[in-house]
Image (tube, rainbow, N blue to C red):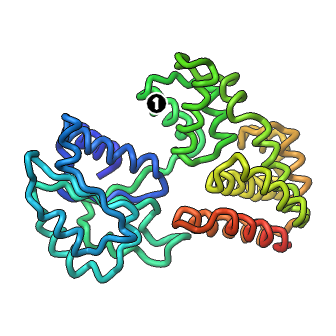
Amino acid sequence: MDYSAFMQAAVGGQPPPLALLHGAGGQLLDDALDAVTRGLFPRPDDVALGREILDGREATADDIARSAMTLPFMTAMRLVAVRRSQALAARGVDTLGPYARDPNPSTCLLFLADEPLVAGRDRRNDHWLLGVVPARCVVALPARRGRALEEWLRQRAGHEGLAVSDEAARLLVQWVGDDAAALLGEARKAALAGGPDARTVGVREVTAVVGEQRLSGVFDLTRAVERGEVGPALRTLDRLLATEEPVLLVSLLVREMRAALVIRDLRTRGQSTDQIARSLRRPAPVVEAVGTRVGAVPEATLARRLERCWQVERRLKSGGEPRAEMATLIVDLCAER
């Protein structure tokens, strides 16, 4: 089942009795849970009676199965959602396996994992849940980038009555990164820049709220890292952390590290600055400056820096201490020459 089909069924009040949604998209998981909740419980008062939310870091397989087998009380259906399902212990297969083969028809059991569960860069093997939940009940969250992400942002903001222009959506993605929740949050704040009743988000509103100062600060941080200047990098980090979320800063660093790797690769292949600028949709002077800075940096070094950023991003999302993780990251990046 794909995400769109799941959402259609959820909004219509017909979600499957068992579903596993996984991927790097916290906002999409929140939207899915909200859609199932509204579909099953049209009356807000029924939510407290029929919905139970568990956390995979704390709940056991027995807790989940017991809750899912509980019959509804004063509602037609029950909804049991397990957030951070990737944290469930593998021994739960003995309990959840039999349940998955014969789920309670009066309960919708949702496993919500905010990271991909398939084997890949972040995971050596498939998560055991993929072997328990039938394939037809597994929903991999769509990974949106570039124009697809901009279009999603415009549509998603439109559901809340906000009209985000094409240029504003593009600017938000460039400045904020790929985190859907952060993008939507910045779009909401940008709407407020036009006044309490404003529902239109344009370049002016985005610039006023997100601001070029954020982008400048991230550039200062990446330049200091590229030069191995630990002191200036840590001072810039401290200044940024006063106003920015650590996860957002890491996502911006990931974006800049990935862009540097791409620019270096394309320059090596003989592409001109203008060609690369059009491909990445970045100003040519910025592409030229980045290309000059990373031209002498080995490709393997850039790849290790990117991998290190991904590691810290995962730790932050798993409850790591933000300032300590970020400071260690910056020191490691500066030392990675």
Estimate the x, y position of residue 66 in percent, counting from the top left: 16, 69
Q: Secondary structure at mark 1?
A: helix
User: In the rendered image, is residue 298 in sight?
Assistant: yes
Badge 1 is on which residue?
155
Locate the C terminus and report the quarter of the image it occupies: bottom right
Query: Percent x, y for residue 277?
Result: 78, 40
> In this rendering, is residue 125 above or below 11?
below
Residue drawn 22% across the image and 47% down it: 48
User: Does residue 243 lie above or below 117 as drawn?
Assistant: above
Q: Residue drawn at (23%, 68%), measured in percent from left and top?
A: 64
- In this picture, is 310 found above or below 217? below
**Residue 296: in sight, yes or no?**
no
Q: Residue 184's spot in the image, x, y percent?
A: 53, 37
Is 284 positioned to the left or the right of 22 in the image?
right
Q: Quadrant of residue 20?
A: bottom left
Report the residue at 26% width, 72% height from top. Answer: 132
At label 1, the amino acid type is: Gln
Q: Residue at x 85, y 58 (%)?
A: 235
Towards the viewer: 17 or 330: 330
Q: Within 10 Å of the Cα at label 1, are there few (<14), some (14-19), or many (20+) other Cα atoms? A: some
Q: From the viewer's perspective, is residue 222 above or below residue 337? A: above
Q: Is residue 162 left or right of residue 86?
A: right
| Residue 201, quarter of the rendered image | top right
Residue 162 versus residue 246: which sits nearer the camera? 246
* Left or right: 81 in relation to 23: left
